[in-house]
């Protein structure tokens, strides 16, 4: 198995079918990848609905549906990592979807020895058109470079999607379920000691990022939650960096601390 796609899902709506349909429609050969859906924090009727969709619309795909009573996207992703059989891992959120050449183009770049990065376009659920997104701007800036460094693609490294991650890079490192804010960026920083050079796919390989009411990014947090999370997250970054300062990039570490503080300020301002 070449690629494992992990899709964490919590009380999904109709958008999940668009996500799974986009994976079923990949140009990447069906025998080369598997899809692992991890339903977390809920069971029926969602489990039955997903099972039915898989049986009806993904017959030719290698799909595994798992269920856990423990909620949390980090926990769900960790389960997916443990069950994965692929040489590489791709993460896709259940309310997002990808273009037909997404996996093939990422895999082709990975074979060149790079950490592959795809195009990403964001949109508001129920509305037409694309909305501004910071990673989209960076893709346009870096898409024609032969190779990129960690510091040149930092924005890509704040999220687990829009890339393929080899099992060798991930090793035994996992998402920290103790964080509900910033856990994605912390995980990528933790494994960044084994990331050397990066390269973008063509603009045709797209990860479509959906913004919707009720999603985790729309949740409101108390001042105490935000400040407490910020302090714990900064300390977590520091512990990781100090564990191996030779292999971790100092500028990248400092940018994560600064980014954590700036993100907290934005959350407090919008609450």
Image (tube, grey):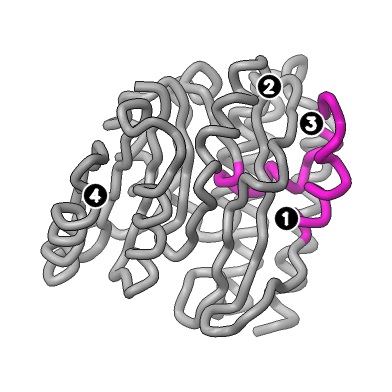
Q: Is residue 266 left or right of residue 124?
A: right
Stretch of the chain drawn in magenta: 134-162
In this rendering, the answer to whether 180 lies above or below 141 is: below
Q: Residue under circle 2?
A: 114
**Of label 3 and label 4, which has the lower sequence position?**
4
Please tell me the numbered disc located at residue 150.
3
* Quadrant where the image shows the C terminus: bottom right
Q: Residue at x 44, y 65 (%)?
A: 95
**Of label 4 and label 1, which has the lower sequence position?**
4
Circle 2 crowding by C-alpha within 10 Å: few under 14, some 14–19, many from 20 = many
Image coords of residue 163 (percent x, y): 59, 38
In this rendering, the answer to whether 252 lies above or below 48 is: above
Viewer-proximal residue, 202 or 228?
202
Image coords of residue 10 (percent x, y): 32, 64
Q: Residue under circle 4?
A: 58
In front of the other: label 1 or label 2? 2
Q: Residue under circle 1?
A: 260
């Amino acid at each position: 198995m070449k690629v494992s796609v992990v899709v964490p899902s919590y009380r999904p709506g109709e958008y999940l079918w668009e996500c799974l349909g986009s994976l079923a429609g990949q140009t990447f050969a069906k025998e080369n990848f598997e899809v692992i859906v991890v339903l977390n924090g809920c069971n029926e009727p969602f489990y039955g609905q997903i099972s039915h969709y898989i049986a009806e619309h993904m017959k030719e795909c290698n799909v595994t549906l798992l269920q856990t009573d423990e909620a949390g996207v980090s926990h769900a992703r960790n389960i997916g990592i443990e069950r994965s059989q692929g040489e590489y891992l791709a993460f896709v959120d259940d309310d997002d979807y990808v273009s037909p050449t997404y996996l093939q183009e990422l895999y082709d770049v990975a074979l060149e020895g790079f950490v592959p990065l795809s195009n990403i376009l964001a949109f508001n659920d129920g509305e037409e058109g694309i909305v501004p997104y910071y990673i989209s701007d960076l893709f346009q800036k870096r898409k024609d470079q032969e190779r990129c460094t960690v510091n040149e693609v930092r924005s890509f490294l704040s999220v687990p999607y829009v890339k393929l991650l080899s099992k060798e890079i991930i090793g035994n490192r996992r998402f920290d379920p103790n964080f509900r804010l910033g856990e994605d960026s912390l995980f990528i920083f933790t494994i960044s000691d084994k990331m050397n050079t990066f390269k973008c796919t063509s603009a045709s390989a797209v990860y479509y990022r959906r913004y919707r009411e009720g999603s985790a990014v729309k949740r409101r947090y108390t001042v105490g939650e935000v400040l407490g999370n910020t302090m714990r997250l900064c300390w977590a970054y520091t512990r990781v960096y100090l564990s191996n300062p030779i292999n971790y990039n100092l500028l990248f570490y400092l940018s994560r601390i600064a980014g954590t503080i700036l993100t907290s300020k934005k959350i407090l301002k919008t609450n």
